[in-house]
Amino acid sequence: GQQLNQSPQSMFIQEGEDVSMNCTSSSIFNTWLWYKQDPGEGPVLLIALYKAGELTSNGRLTAQFGITRKDSFLNISASIPSDVGIYFCAGQPTAGGTSYGKLTFGQGTILTVHP
Amino acid sequence: DAGVIQSPRHEVTEMGQEVTLRCKPISGHDYLFWYRQTMMRGLELLIYFNNNVPIDDSGMPEDRFSAKMPNASFSTLKIQPSEPRDSAVYFCASSLRGDTEAFFGQGTRLTVV
């Protein structure tokens, strides 16, 4: 089945530092999504990527859909305390296959920001 | 739209009891997903539906778990009988199509004692 490997598992950084996390897949994805989860809440969508090579920004967040369609990264610039949380990558396989629509998540990256 | 709505938010039950979790997806969304989240296993996809039809239930742990979607605006996840190891946060999510972003509910925190 599909495997999503997300790294790092956790990060401890100082406020103001930049952060980078990535995901790799054992199979080709049609869509890459990045979510953030705060304690006691459901994951909230940050960025959606639909085309190989696509680079998309949302404020201080930037994400890219890898050329091979098997990887994606998320960067956070100038981190602030409210960036604390768990970040997840997620992917959906290409259309036409038996797994179309199956949204699979990485293991998550726990981000801690020290003021 | 109010987003994906799950109920209850919290459920505490005794081992052996039946538990039913409920979800109302975003109107017009064709796909509905049920996930279970634990510290050890992260976010696991249990089952997903397309147009009310179950497409892949390979993530359902065992026969004690069942899910239904009787119509486009309602789905249930049932555990019977429940066991302590079922304690987790269960999320429902919906998406417009199979290749678009999914939106999550706030989850149901289940504790089986």
Image: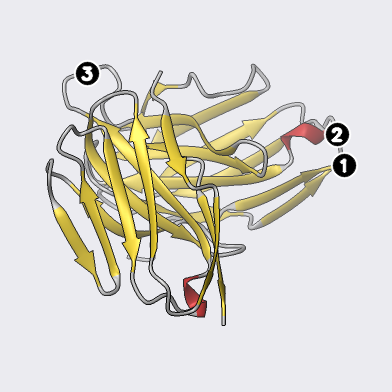
Does residue A112 appear left or right of residue A18 in this picture? right
Q: Same subunit under labels 2 and 3?
A: no
Does residue B59 appear left or right of residue B71 in this picture? right
Lower sequence index among marks 2 and 1: 2
Q: Name the subunit of mark 2.
A: B
Identity, as a three-letter code, of the amino acid under mark 1: Val
Q: Name the subunit of mark 3.
A: A
The reply to whether dot 2 and dot 1 touch (C-beta < 8 Å) is: yes
Which residue sits at x=42%, y=26%?
A3
Q: Residue A16's spot in the image, x, y percent? A: 43, 79
The residue labelled by disc 2 is: B15
Disc number for residue B84: none
The residue labelled by disc 3 is: A97
Q: Nearer the viewer, residue A61 or A14?
A: A14
Q: In the figure, A17 relative to B9: above or below?
A: below
Identity, as a three-letter code, of the amino acid under mark 2: Met
Q: Looking at the figure, which quarter contains the N terminus of chain B?
A: bottom left
Q: In the figure, A17 relative to A104: above or below?
A: below
Mark pair 2, 3: CA separation: 39 Å
Q: Nearer the viewer, mark 3 or mark 1?
A: 3
Mark pair 3, 1: CA separation: 41 Å
Identity, as a three-letter code, of the amino acid under mark 3: Gly
Q: Looking at the figure, which quarter contains the C terminus of chain B?
A: top right
